[in-house]
Amino acid sequence: MTLARLYPVIKPLLFAMDAESAHRLTINALKVIKPTPVTLPDDSSLRVTLWDRNFPNPIGLAAGFDKNAEVIAPMFGLGFGFVEVGTVTPRPQHGNPRPRVFRDPASNAVINRMGFPNIGMNKFKTNLEKFLESRPRPAGMVGINIGMNKSQTDPAKDYCLLVRTLGPFADYISVNISSPNTPGLRNLQDPEAFLDLTAQILEERTKACGKEMPPPLLVKLAPDLTPDQQEALAKAALKSGIDGLILGNTTLSRPDTLSAAFRDQKGGLSGEPLTDKSTDMIRNFYRLTQGKLPIIGVGGVSSARDAYDKIRAGASLVQLYSALVFQGPGMVKKATAELAALLKADGFAHIQDAVGRGA
Ligand SMILES: Cc1cc2nc3c(=O)[nH]c(=O)nc-3n(C[C@H](O)[C@H](O)[C@H](O)COP(=O)(O)O)c2cc1C
């Protein structure tokens, strides 16, 4: 039986458990079962070449699902065109007290305040190397999402150390300065702090990976930036020399439609209530940067239509996480196939032709 068929059977069991225990069980099961990879139709219209890298399709796994780089191969097996692992910090850390992840099936949303629990960069690197040495290696790209330890007072030190240690293994690096669960992290979105941090990281990247074809450096931003902050950051991003933006992380906002018990949990909200907010942010940044800075769009993608909306708003690639929780693994293959159909219906021969066409 395929994983997609199995999911409706095991979903009630997973939902009867605390969200994080269900997630841990899923990761452990994926490591043991090693499910057979799905076969996607070989559709050239979905291939994306970006930063001289080839993405088999534009739908990726967002950061936070595979924090420790434990299940990269099985996640490619679901049909993802790329997998972003992390957030990883230099030293291992436990994160915030549990419970710290909450699901709301009524709104298909998640709130988390995990605070970067992870095994630290050395063990993470061992896991990553195991994947990279495996044969045959899946075709997709692997992004590494990096963050600072909670105890660090000089953020650039941690980010530079992570780039030095993990940069040579990455197809791209995602600099996370937007998680709401590490105190002070979002202050790095202040344009001056942003320019200072990215300059140091870019210098470190050249030292660690050379000038030839270093992993592209992307910065992941929060969807809670005001229009003025977005404008200032777009200018800073263009000036900084980074290669792209990931838009965006979870939100601190709480739509009125959420039930009171769920809404009151502290942390970052993801899933369907975030869909339009993040698409609007993508459109704003695409306009503000005149399409010069590639964008990975993420936030509430739960169907091909959501992915397509983000691409038309200006995203070159998209990611998802929360939809997997509610719909299960079969949704990746389904969304990919339906995305190809949406493209065709609009007369686009290739996904790259649709980027920003609705901006
Ligand atoms: C439980 C959970 C943990 C997450 N952990 C991280 C993380 O470690 N680093 C990060 O950059 N984003 C993290 N995210 C945010 C996701 O990568 C993504 O930006 C956000 O969930 C919006 O996408 P979605 O609506 O498809 O889930 C996490 C999200 C969830 C639900």
Image (cartoon, grey):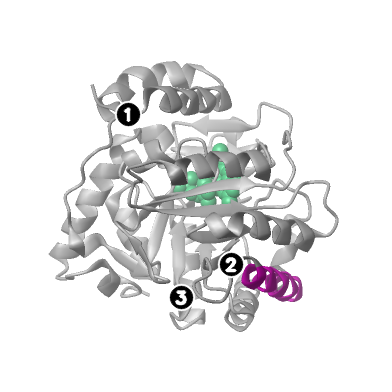
- Note whether 163 is above or below 61 in the view shown: below
Tag 3 near tag 2, CB within 8 Å: no
Alpha carbon distance from label 2 to label 1: 34 Å
Q: Tell me the residue at 51%/28% (across/down).
A: 23
Q: Which residue is mark 2?
A: 209
Q: Quadrant of residue 92?
A: top right
Which label number is shown at residue 286? Answer: 3
Q: Are there few (<14), some (14-19), or many (20+) residues within 10 Å of tag 1? A: some
Q: Which residue is mark 1?
A: 35
Q: Nearer the viewer, mark 3 or mark 2?
A: 2
Residue found at x 50% / y 32%? 104
**Residue 276 numbered tag:** none
> Residue 56 placed where, x, y %?
29, 57
Viewer-proximal residue among 266 and 200: 200
Left or right position of 141 against 25: left
Q: Are marks 1 and 3 in contact (CB under 8 Å)?
A: no
Q: Which residues are magenta?
A: 192-207
* Amino acid at dot 2: Cys
